[in-house]
Structures are given as structure tokens and as C-alpha cells.
Amino acid sequence: MNSRKVYCLSLLFLLIFIPVGKVSAQVMHITGNIYKTMKGLDGGHDNRMPLSVPVYVFDNKSEANRQANVFRSKNKGLGEEVKITSNATVNPDYDGHFETEVSAKGALLIINDNEVKVVPITSALTYEIVFSDAAKSILLANTTVIGKQQGVNILEMKPIDDGPNLHWDVTIRLPEWYTSDHSRLIFQPMAIDCQTEDTIQYLEPLVYEGKSYHRNQIRRKSFDYDRNDSLHSYYISDKPTTDSAFIFRWQTTYLKPDPARSYKWGSILRIADYTHVYFNDNSRSGTCNTRKPWKFLDVSMAKKEIELTPQYYEQARAQLREVPRNLQLTFIVGKDELTPDSSNQVNLDRLIGELRSFGRSLMNFTVQGTASPEGNVTLNTKLATSRAKKALSIIGSQISSAGLEVKEPLVYTWFDVADSLADRGLVTESGILRDFATNNNAAGIREMQMTPAVQEILNNQRLMRCTYTLRQNKILSPDEALWAYYNASDYLEGGTSAFSNGDYYNLFRSIKDSTELRKLTYRAWRENKGKRTMKYSPFAAYLANRMACYAIDDDSIDLSILAPFIDMKSGLEISRPISFDNSYYYMVNRRELVANQAIMYFKSMRLGEAYHLAAKLPNTDSYRDIKMFTDLEVLFFKQGKTPQEQRRAEEALRYVMNSNLENNVILSFELASELGKTYDDIEPLVDSLPDTNPKKWYIKAVIEADKPEVSDADFMELATKYGADVALRMTDNSNPAFLAYFQHCFDMRPQYRKFYETDANISDECRKKYPYDEKKADQYRQKFIDLMVAAGKMEAPKSEVDDMNDTSKEKEISE
């Protein structure tokens, strides 16, 4: 390519208007390319170089002009920063190309080197706006700055996210003649928030200088370079610039301001001679995707279960149960005197006997008088209250230890009777009675009052109500607890009776079936975690530990489970009083809970907390697993390790890799570049994992994404073996095999989808070319079946097998 065409530095906008919807004159889709003119080394001819400066999109050209004028006025020596507020902002790529939508009445605003231009949107299809370089900086010869592969080359190693830190490793290569013996190169890295694209921090720069430049700079700074040059602290003396190709490496560990957010690096690369900057590249940035090398590690062998010993047995705390009853007593009409029949006495004796059987567990007894709607409401209310007092005085004399109370009377209306009729399915009768009541039709009401259904409802409404409250503090025996758990309807979850922690203790000691124990654990945990006193309960700590073990087995994280029982600032197994005037003590930091919470922190990539908790545990074989895991996480990628830390990191790596086959495969894959392995080396190891392991298919997907696309030659071979239909699907590069593996993994373990979304093991180019589309899930699943058929792990569908046989027969006949 002609160098004059390659080094062009003019601003060129090619705007192609495409109508959006039916409103062709309102919204346009435009594309453009941005360039800038610079002076070349070939006799002063202008050359062009692409720019990647922001393009501010305004849907109102007057607003664009106003902000442009504000920018110009504030840049006349005042040095004030001007913020442009637009409807949208577009960042061109390295070739200066961009696309956007804009109003037909709008404009674009572009700023370069404090020069601002406004490009109004008109009916023209092509725009050319030139930013001239006032300094006429020289465009370096013999280099290509437009072609991405021929200009500045930046190789970014896949970023590593260990939780609180990001590890960035970038190599920058500049072709010949970019730098010289008389140049200074400044590489200014920065941290960018991926969610907002805002630069949130400038990091320490790298400064390289040619030997001649450095000698002259010392003279220019009055021979006191270290004092008078603001960049002296960042000068790298052992790598001078020359006119040869220049390569340097930038490595850093960045502490994330918010561990839950994602960040990427950006950079400004400038090369200057003695008088001005002649090369400036501020468009480079890294990927937001990262490697999380510990995400799949199996840490289940490090979890600690608690043996259910008597120290976790709790006496029952008082539980209150309110029992409702109908008071089966009859009174003389219009009076508060009981009818002199034997049924009244039988019902009284039965109720008093029931109440006295509870002894001092009976806390309270209440009576509520009722009245049906016949007659005067005021008289009915007074009579109901009088009868309730009479009943309470008779019964209360026999249960003097309980609290006695008369509730406000319940006086029913004819509308209540109508509701009761509707509840019995007598909808027509209910509607008639409701109309009579609304219209005060006394005759109609009297007529309906004689019907059997209404008579029965009125009799029920005349029955007084009573309730009594019990204080229950009895622990059920193991047999009683088992019977109640499996048979008593009131002991169902949410029923009127509840198991105490002592009852649950007996149930856990009695039930042996693992499925039933898991179900029981979840129920008991739901009931305990709602109690304000949970953190003081030893049995609640036992339940929390069981829940944590289940979470670890399921490869899920919930730090809140064990948090109430952990004190990050205290030592191991500390006993504390609930209050200064209380002799009851509770324990924090039980060692099993500390170990499991350290695992939770490890899996959530909060390595500081994980390491802190693991350090509390004793240095015994029982807790060596979790200590090795945290050592690996904290030390492996640490920069500037001491010899002792290096030894511990190597020991931890060996230990975890040898813990089981799964971890060996995971670390061989995740740390392939650090261990000097290739995907070809580790693929047989990955294949040795069981097909039921979703991690296998995730790793297989990453390896497959790194392979070349299937060729036509592969199609002929596959068609011969499996038939044309299968071969077509197998060689369909629009539905690549790696997405089929990912889909199978997500079907097995949906939560692994979140890892795929930000995994740097899948390159940005691959994601752009083959994006995962949930709407194509069935196509991916079919591709996976085809892959399994080809691998001999699954038989081809019968119809396709028949087609293959027919093809074979035709081939034999032709031969």
C-alpha cells in the first residue's frame, strides 16, 4: 500500500442516510471516518492519519453550535475544562470509523487538539472536514499507522481477576522509526469502569528516553534531572529508545475500588522530541473480560460437618398456642340464665376438665358473647355481654390461675346470614335475603327465617365463643417427635403447632434418610433464621453449618448463612455472655463454621477474608485443605513474592492439583499459560472427566473455540460416516461446536452462564463473530447431539441411520 495513503491524517466523514421506519425525514443512520492531516517526510505533502476522538451527536444543531462556542471561549488561555453534554457519544475504532443515528435537524461536534468543528446534518451524502495540524507534526516514514497489524501492536495477556485485584499484563511493540535516540516515550495507563466507560484512576506511567534525549534533558534541567523533571520518578534507565523497533512490557496489580464491578485498562501513548509531541495514541484499551482461575475448583473436601452432640441440645423456650372453641351452653330466652337441662352441665364439666388438665400452662381464657340478628341490636348486644360474663364467672371459678377476659360481643346481621347461605352454595337464597335486608323488608326476612338452612345458621350464631392460650415448653420425646413429624397435621410447616429446637434435635438424631434430613434441615433453618435470638442458639449454628455444607456441595455461595455466627475480629471459639447481667453464654467462631465460611469467601473470590479466616484455624491435617486453597489464591499471582511465599505458592499448587482429578484438570486448563501447557496437551485430561460433570463441557467449549473452523474436506469425511444431514450440521460454522458445548453445560448447571459472560478465555473477536444467542438454544443442543454421535457416545437418530444405509447401498450399486 502506498505510504502516502497509509499515513493520512485528515478528518473525513462519509455520511450515508438510511431512513428509520416510515419517518424518512426525521432520523438517519450515518457512518463516518475521521482523519487528520500531518506533514510527511516526502517533500511536505499532506498525509492522513485516522483519529479516534469522540463524536458528540446532537439532535438539535443550535445546541451543538452553542456548546462549541462555549468550548472556544473557555479555551482562550483560561485552561478551564469544558464538558460536552450531547444526546449521544460515539467512539470511532482504530481506523477512525463510526456509526450512529442522528436527527435530520441535528449536528455532530468533534474536538481535536482544542480545535472544535460542528458538522450540520444536511441532505448531502458525503462530508469531508479537515483538521489541520497547526504544528505540522511529522508523520513517521516506513511505518503503517492505519493498518492494525502494521502499526502499534499491543498484545494483552488475558486479564486475571482474583476477586479484589485485577492483574494486567500488556506488551507494546512499536515498529522501526517510531522512536529514536532523540525521543521520549510516555506510556500513561489508566483504569476504566466498564459499566460507565469513565476513567476512574491514572496509574503510574512508564517513561523511556533515548540516550541523546536523556543527556540533553539533563542539560535542559540545569543538570538536576531528578529534581526538575516531573517525570523523573518514572524514567526507566535500562531500556533507551532508538530508531529500531521498540518493545516494552507493562505489568500491574490493580486493587478494584468495588470488587463487584468490572474494570479495564486504557492508555495514552505519546512520543515527543525536544519541542513537541509527534505521535499520540489515546484510543487503546483492554478487555472487560477476565480470567477467574479459581472459579471451578472443587473445595468440597475442605468442608467441615458438625457432629450432633448434646452440646447442641436446647431446652424448649415457651411457645404460645391459642385454641378456639365453641361454648356449647344454652340460655333462657331473653335472659342471662342457663337453661336447667343436663346438657349444659355436661358441656361445662367437659370444658373445665380440659382446661384444668393444662395446669399452669394455661395462660389465659376468654369468652365472647354472640347474638343472631333477630330483634333489637342494642338489646342483643347487652344480652350477649351479660351472658359472656355469666359463663366466665362459672368457668373462671374453676381455673383461677389463668387470666380471664370477656371480649367485645359479636352481633351478627342479616348480611352475615346471607354470606353463610352463599358459603353453603345457596346463592339464590343468599341474593333474596340480601335484597330483603337492603330494603328493610321485615315480612320477607320473617318468611326466610323459617327455612331450615337459615334456622341452622341462626342457631350457630347464638353459640358463644371461647379461646384459651397455652404456654408449651415440653420437649417431645424422639418417638413423639417422629410421630408428630410424619402424622400430626398441626405440626406441618406453618401449622398451629411448632417444633422447638429440642424437638428438632431429637428428629435429627432419629431420622437417617439423607433426603429427608435435607428437607428437615431446610425447614428448621427457615424457622430459626427468622428469630432475633438466632445467633445465640447452638442448634441454629448447627443448622447453619448443615446449610453451608449443602451450598458448598451445590457449588453455590451464600455468605449470609454463617455470618451471624462469625466475628472477623475475634479468635477461635470465643464464649460470650448474652448481656452483662445474664449467666447464659453463647459461642462465636466455632471452628467448623469458620472453615466453611472461609470456603464461601474463597468461592466468592474475596481472598482477603478467606485468608484471614483460614489463618484462625489450627495448623493440623484436618484444616490443611482450606489453608492450601487460600495460599494458592493469595500467593500464586502475587507480584514480588518472597522466597518463602514462592515456596508456599508452589506447595499449594501441587497440593490442590493432587487433591482430585477434577482440580488437576481445572488448574491445568486455567493456568495453562503459566504452567507452559497447551490446550492440545490438556484435552485428553479433560476428556477423562465424567460426562455428567458440567465443568467438563465448559472447558471443552473453551478449547473448541480456539480451534480452526471445520473445512469442506471434513464435510466429505463426516458425510461418509454419518450421512449428509449430520455432516451439514457438523460443518455449519454459523453454529459452532463450542456453543453446543456451552449450551450443554448451561443446561446442566444454569449458574455457569454468568462465568461465560465475562470469561477472557473466549476472545472478544470470537464473541463478536459467534455471539451466544439464547433463541438458538435448540440448534446448539442438536449440534451437541451430532458431536456425541461423531464421538461414538450416542447413536444417530434412526431416520438418519436409514439414510446412511441407503447411501451405502447406492454406492455399492454404482461400484
Image (cartoon, rainbow, N blue to C red):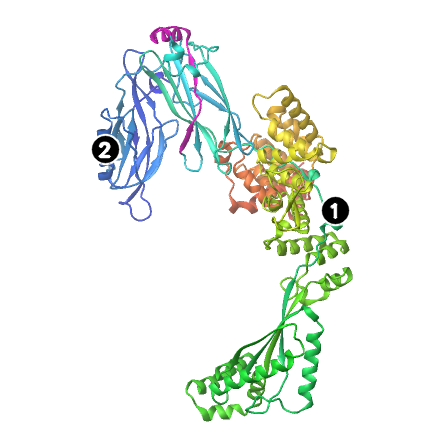
Q: Nearer the viewer, residue 285 or 610?
A: 610
- At label 2, the amino acid type is Val
Residue marked by disc 2: 70
Q: Which mark is residue 307?
A: 1
- At label 1, the amino acid type is Glu
Q: How far from the left and from the top, in percent, is residue 313? A: 72, 53
**Quadrant location, the N terminus:** top left
- Residue at left 60%, top 29%? 634
Mark sitting earlier along the chain (1/2)? 2
Q: Nearer the viewer, residue 251 or 609?
A: 609
Q: Could you tell whether 572 is left or right of 779 in the image?
A: right
Query: What count of labels does the image hold?
Result: 2
Secondary structure beneath dot 2 equals helix
Secondary structure beneath dot 1 equals loop
Up-down: is 428 above or below 507?
A: below
- Residue at left 64%, top 78%? 396
Residue extent of the magenta highlight: 198-223
Quadrant in which residue 808 is drawn: top right
Mark 1 near mark 2, Cβ–Cβ under 8 Å?
Answer: no
Q: How far from the left and from the top, in percent, is residue 256? A: 49, 32
Magenta highlight on residue 220: yes
Is residue 258 something one can see in this rendering? yes
